[in-house]
Amino acid sequence: MYLLGALPLDVWVKLTFTESLVDRKGTHMESPTHSLPSLFKQLGLASDPVGIEKFVTSHSPLKPGLKLHEAFFWSPAQAAFLRDEILEDADWAEVIDQLNELLHKVH
């Protein structure tokens, strides 16, 4: 599991572009099936580190209890994708959960 709270957003976004991640103890962590940049690309959003950071900082924090797919800024197709992938616990679910955590934090 990623230590999202332990890393600044810009560092975390840069790490998602690497093949393998290492935790604070130096242990290699399993890479998710999909990365945050690939999720942004799937959603039709800027998928480079600067674009991701701008999106997250301009759309966070979401209200506590608000489901990610219910946020006002998603198109109907984006919201449906986010909702369905989580409900089906599909390959995208892990990285969608990570985005949810990022958008619920104050940056």
Image (cartoon, rainbow, N blue to C red):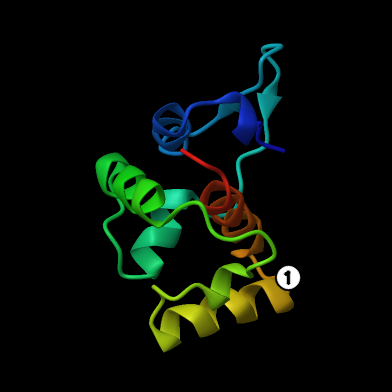
Number of residues whose C-alpha sits closer than 10 Å to that of mark 1, classed few (under 14), some (14–19) or many (20 or more)? few
Quadrant for the N terminus in the image: top right
Quadrant housing residue 38: bottom left
Name the residue at 72% across, 78% down. Answer: 87
18 lies left or right of 85: left
Query: Type of residue at label 1?
Result: Asp
Q: Position of residue 77 (x, y in %)?
A: 43, 86
Where does residue 28 sit, x and y in percent of width and height? 66, 23
Q: Where is residue 99 in the image (x, y as percent from the top left)?
A: 54, 54
**At x 31% / y 70%, what residue is drawn?**
44
Residue 76 higher or lower than 104, as above or below: below
Q: Name the residue under label 1.
A: 89
Outermost residue, bottom side: 76
Lateral position of residue 50 relative to residue 92, left or right: left
Give the x, y percent position of residue 81.
Answer: 52, 79
Label 1: element kind: loop
